[in-house]
């Protein structure tokens, strides 16, 4: 099943909301900075191969590009989002595809012969997946896309700031983000401590896991 997205302008279910959003659609820069900090806390080499699964319009990839990372790839189901990402990050490598379908259709153990990323990122995706098995499929996709000695960074909203609606299909509590990576096979899984604001000290659940 393709992750469900909000209604389009015609009030019909839309599997691609990006064509209805302006190019400068507001995106919280603090959250992208936090994700960058989580990556940079472990990644110290600018030549690392980084893939953002569910990259949207490339805001995080743009942040990474501006701070020296150049071998960047974005994967998303939306062609419109990927075109915008390529405008933000010239030379960006992209792959269009739904993450669940990609995970289902691929022989995952063989992905290491094709993808081999040093860092795999998946932020604000898991809460949109409608089925429990979809969470496992995407987590496995991250695991088998990660090169030896690489690592994964994920984030999901805490249930204190998120609610179930047509777009957000499941809620997570602190610790759930760690289980997602542990169940997929990552080791040395730990959370990323940060302070977002006095009102919402840690509204997102970050986890970092190493490839065994």
Image (spheres, helix red, strand yellow):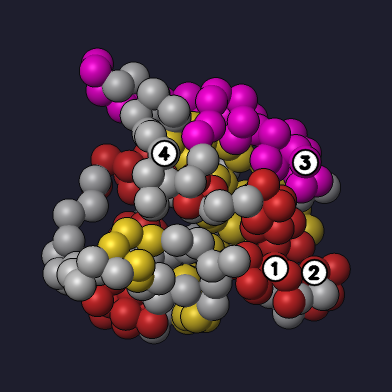
Q: Give the residue number, with chain letter if any, for mark 2.
A: 108
Q: Can see residue 86?
A: no
Crowd tier of the residue under label 2, counting other residues whose Cα lies within 10 Å: few below 14, some 14–19, many 20 or above: some
Q: Residue at x 54, y 67 (%)?
A: 2
Q: Is residue 10 left or right of residue 140?
A: left
Q: Give the residue number, with chain letter if any, for mark 3.
A: 183
Number of residue marks: 4
Secondary structure at numbered mark 3: helix
Q: Give the residue number, with chain letter if any, for mark 4.
A: 164
Crowd tier of the residue under label 1, counting other residues whose Cα lies within 10 Å: few below 14, some 14–19, many 20 or above: many
* Measured Cα–Cα span from mark 3 to mark 4: 24 Å
Query: Which disc number belongs to residue 103?
Result: 1
Query: Which disc number belongs to residue 32?
Result: none
Q: Are marks 1 and 2 in contact (CB under 8 Å)?
A: yes
Q: Is residue 141 above or below residue 207?
A: below
Of labels 4 and 2, earlier in sequence is: 2
Is residue 177 shown in magenta? yes
Secondary structure at numbered mark 4: loop
- Tag nearer the camera, 3 or 4: 4
Of labels 3 and 4, earlier in sequence is: 4
Q: Which residues are magenta?
A: 171-199
Of labels 4 and 1, earlier in sequence is: 1
Q: Quadrant location of residue 117? A: bottom right
């Amino acid at each position: 099943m393709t992750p469900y997205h909000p209604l389009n302008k015609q009030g019909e279910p839309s599997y691609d909301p990006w064509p209805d959003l302006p190019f400068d659609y507001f995106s919280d820069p603090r959250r992208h900075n936090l994700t960058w900090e989580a990556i940079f806390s472990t990644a110290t080499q600018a030549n690392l191969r980084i893939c953002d699964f569910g990259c949207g319009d490339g805001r995080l990839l743009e942040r990474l590009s501006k701070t020296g990372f150049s071998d960047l790839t974005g994967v998303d189901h939306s062609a419109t989002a990927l075109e915008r990402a390529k405008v933000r990050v010239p030379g960006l490598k992209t792959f269009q595809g739904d993450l669940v379908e990609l995970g289902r259709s691929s022989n995952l153990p063989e992905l290491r012969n094709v993808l081999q990323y040093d860092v795999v990122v998946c932020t604000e995706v898991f809460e949109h997946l409608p089925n429990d098995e979809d969470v496992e499929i995407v987590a496995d996709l991250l695991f088998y896309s990660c090169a030896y000695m690489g690592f994964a960074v994920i984030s999901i909203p805490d249930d204190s700031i998120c609610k179930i609606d047509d777009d957000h299909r499941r809620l997570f509590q602190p610790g759930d983000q760690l289980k997602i990576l542990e169940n997929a096979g990552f080791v040395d899984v730990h959370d990323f401590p940060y302070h977002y604001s006095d009102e919402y000290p840690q509204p997102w659940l970050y986890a970092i896991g190493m490839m065994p």
